[in-house]
Image: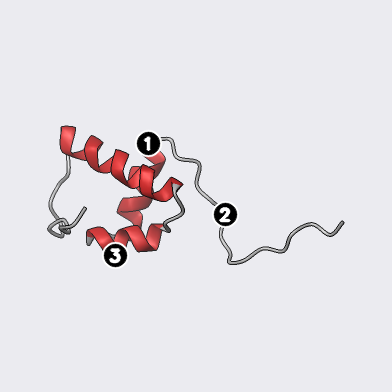
Amino acid sequence: MAETLKKGTRVTGAERDKLAAELKKRYDSGESIRALAAATGRSYGFIHRILTESGVNLRGRGGATRGKKS
């Protein structure tokens, strides 16, 4: 996704499905919603909505977590 989407343009149909698949793949590989928003030129809310529509299991908030003590 080298080019950013023009802000405010509607993304529908096959183009939306293609974008959703790309975002889902990148999110599942560890990229954050904020990073995806910056890369595509879209808002956090837009990316969040696309991911939830795609059935992505969103990660919880927060930074590094501590592992369980054994």
Q: As drawn, is 28 to the left or to the right of 49?
A: right
Q: Residue type at mark 3?
A: Ala
Residue 54 lies in what quarter of the image? top left
Q: 67 and 38: which one is in front?
A: 67
Q: As drawn, is 13 to the left or to the right of 31?
A: left
Q: Sequence-wise, which precedes: disc 3 or disc 2?
A: 3
Vertical position of residue 48 compared to residue 67: above or below: above
Q: Residues within 10 Å of mark 1 (few under 14, many from 20)?
A: some
Q: As drawn, is 44 to the left or to the right of 2?
A: right
Q: Which residue is mark 2?
A: 60
Q: Which residue is mark 1?
A: 54
Extreme-top residue of the structure: 14
Residue located at (37% from left, 43% from top): 24
Judging from the image, what secondary structure is the residue with disc 2 in?
loop
- Label 3 and label 2: CA atoms lie apart by 20 Å
Image quarter hosting the C terminus: bottom right
- Label 3 and label 1: CA atoms lie apart by 20 Å
Q: Quick check: marks 3 and 2 in contact, CB under 8 Å?
A: no
Residue 47 point in image, percent of width and height: 33, 52
- Label 1 and label 2: CA atoms lie apart by 17 Å
Residue 64 point in image, percent of width and height: 62, 66
Residue located at (23% from left, 38% from top): 18
Q: Residue type at mark 2?
A: Gly
Q: Residue type at mark 1?
A: Ser
Q: Which residue is mark 3?
A: 38
